[in-house]
Image (cartoon, helix red, strand yellow):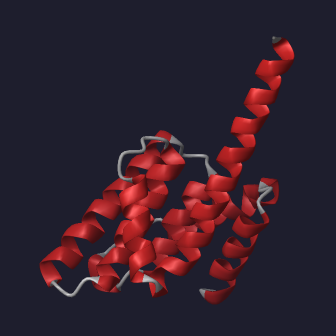
Amino acid sequence: MRIFCVLLCSLISVCYSQELEDIRYNYSQAATNKLLCKEMIYKLRNDREPIRIAYLGAFQTIWAKHTLNPFEKLKTFKEGKANIEESVAQSPSDTEIRFIRLSVQLNAPKFLGYSNNIEEDKKIIRYSGSDIKSETLQKMIKECLKSKE
């Protein structure tokens, strides 16, 4: 019975890790793929895990680029921002969540006023970024920091 539990936990862990890798990959593609962005919002909308809330928020802020209605743009951006901030409040030391917020703030139009945590997030990412095991996430962080310096 104990072996079965260990195997089951290992299988769940592998599936969870792969699903998170898929979310990361989709995040890097969402700005240029409207359908994928919408699909990810739908997929993550009921999840309450902090990292998934952060990605939901990020996809929502990207969705603001895809929609044409200015009121919808602002509404979805604000919803995304609120979800990102909720996830930071729940897990303030999570490097990936800090990266998500940083990437959104670096790419948000200045008039939205969502850029007040850039230096704080960069500092946390640089301090604990070496602990990241995901190659996909490491690459995303490297590209984000390099492109905006």
**Is 13 left or right of 75, judged from the image as shown?**
right
Which of these two is toward me, 109 or 34?
34
55 versus 90 height, above or below = below
**Is 146 left or right of 63, judged from the image as shown?**
right
Tally the marks. 0
Quadrant for the N terminus in the image: top right
Residue 66 seen:
yes
57 versus 5 height, above or below = below
Quarter of the image holding residue 34? bottom left
Quarter of the image holding residue 95? bottom right
Query: Percent position (x, y) of residue 83?
Result: 36, 54
Query: Percent position (x, y) of residue 42?
Result: 36, 59
Query: Percent position (x, y) of residue 126?
Result: 72, 64
Which of these two is toward me, 129 or 2?
2
Residue 84 seen:
no
* Residue furthest to the top: 1
The residue drawn where x is 35% and y is 67% is 60
* Residue furthest to the right: 3
The residue drawn where x is 16% and y is 83% is 70
8 versus 121 height, above or below = above
Which of these two is toward me, 47 or 97?
47
**Is 65 left or right of 21, judged from the image as shown?**
left
The residue drawn where x is 13% and y is 77% is 71
Quadrant for the C terminus in the image: bottom right
The residue drawn where x is 70% and y is 50% is 17
Query: Percent position (x, y) of residue 46?
Result: 36, 45
